[in-house]
Image: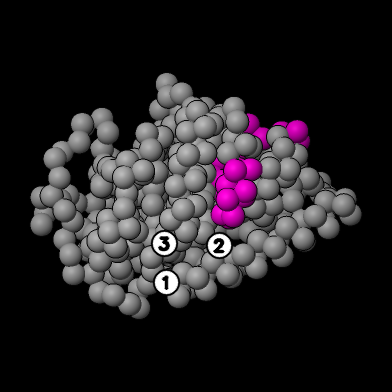
Amino acid sequence: MPIEKKKIEANAKVRLRRRLRFARTRARELAAIGKALASTKHPFLVHIIPMRRCNLDCGYCNEYDDVSKPVPLEEMKKRLDILAGMGTSIITISGGEPLMHPEIEEVIRHMRKRGMIAGMITNGFLLSKERIAKLNESGLEHLQISIDNVTPDEVSKKSLKTLDSRLEWLAEFAVFQVNINSVLGSGVKDPEDALKIAHRAVELGFTSTVGIIHDGNGQLKPLGPRELEIFEEIMTLGKRSFSRFNDFQHSVARGKEHKWRCRSGSRYLYICEDGLVHWCSQQRGYPGIPLAQYTPEMRHREFLTDKFCGPKCTVSCVQQVGILDNWRDPQTLKPMPMAPPPAAGLVQIGGSRSDH
């Protein structure tokens, strides 16, 4: 079913605020990259989870539940203070669904107060004009929504038909940057949907990226011929981004292993709702150390640790951070032995520590 389109244009005040915030954010991003190139002693990007619960149940997702309570605001502030003390440059709030957290704007406001670039990944369902205004005032700088299909199906409800009105509100009222991520390989019936979503994103003035979902066993799964064509076309749409400075996505699309130096646990951290540090969303359980106990020495060791899951990684944000350091410090260490965590607390993709 085609999406009914109408001309969407922000008013002059929103356009001015948007330009000013974009300019400030871009300057801070360039400064963060310069700082990261000059020193390896601080995290560049951290994903933090304020709430594991989600209002959706997408068939391919392993990052949510339907029972968790939100992390209390004061606890979130403590974790953000620790990350700021480490020198962290960028924090992305993820989930679950972060907009379900009743004080998420205060979390964002504290991130900005501590000098860190503030981003968020959401499914978009809880956006409203009023919520967008609150996110504007909190200082949010980046927002990403992944949209899986044009109309909802049994795999995913994150459809363009369902979300398009919210996208129009973002185009009209948001002063933060918006990226729409279309998805290939998730089991959605029609891969052409990803192309339609990408074109709609660009039409509304957003940036557009494409994500590739791993298969049910967490491994690389090559795209089909038409999916590959769609992938390449989406990659050429809109503004160029940091993610396109290397070719890992092209390897992922073709199911090829890729050689790089994953700096998760050091330059990239994933902080779960329990306040534990993990390599990433697809290796929850390693190293599984409380953030307050995560020392510079631990970060340095992980910087030099060769990750067994690296060749088959599909986590684009970790790959992007790796660009900063692929040219230096070969990884010569193996992951530290550790007692197995409780089965319910581990999500393990692409190998295991017993491989080494």
Marks 2/1: CA–CA distance: 34 Å
Disc 1 is placed on an element classified as loop
Residue lying at 31% horizontally and 53% vertically, measured from the top left: 295
User: Mark 2 or 3 closer to N-term?
Assistant: 3
Residue lying at 67% horizontally and 35% vertically, measured from the top left: 127
The residue identified by callout 2 is 234
User: Mark 2 or 1 closer to N-term?
Assistant: 1
Q: Is residue 110 visible?
A: yes
Which one is closest to the eye, mark 2 or mark 1? 1
Split into 4 quadrants, where in the image is the C terminus? Answer: bottom left
Residue lying at 72% horizontally and 65% vertically, measured from the top left: 23
Looking at the image, residue 321 lies above or below residue 77: below
Q: Within 10 angstroms of label 3, few (less than 14), some, or many (20 or more) residues? A: many
Q: Nearer the viewer, residue 265 or 311?
A: 265
Residue 301 occupies quadrant: bottom left
Which one is closest to the eye, mark 2 or mark 3? 3
User: Which three-letter amino acid code belongs to the residue tagged 3?
Assistant: His
Disc 2 is placed on an element classified as helix
Looking at the image, residue 25 lies above or below residue 143: below
| Residue sitting farthest toward the right | 12
Q: Are marks 3 and 1 in contact (CB under 8 Å)?
A: yes
The residue identified by callout 3 is 42
Q: Is residue 227 visible?
A: no
The stretch of residues the image draws in magenta is 108-130
Residue lying at 65% horizontally and 68% vertically, measured from the top left: 27
Does the segment drawn in magenta span residue 123? yes
Q: Are marks 2 and 3 in contact (CB under 8 Å)?
A: no
Looking at the image, residue 273 lies above or below residue 184: above
Q: Within 10 angstroms of label 1, few (less than 14), some, or many (20 or more) residues? A: few
Residue 39 has which mark?
1
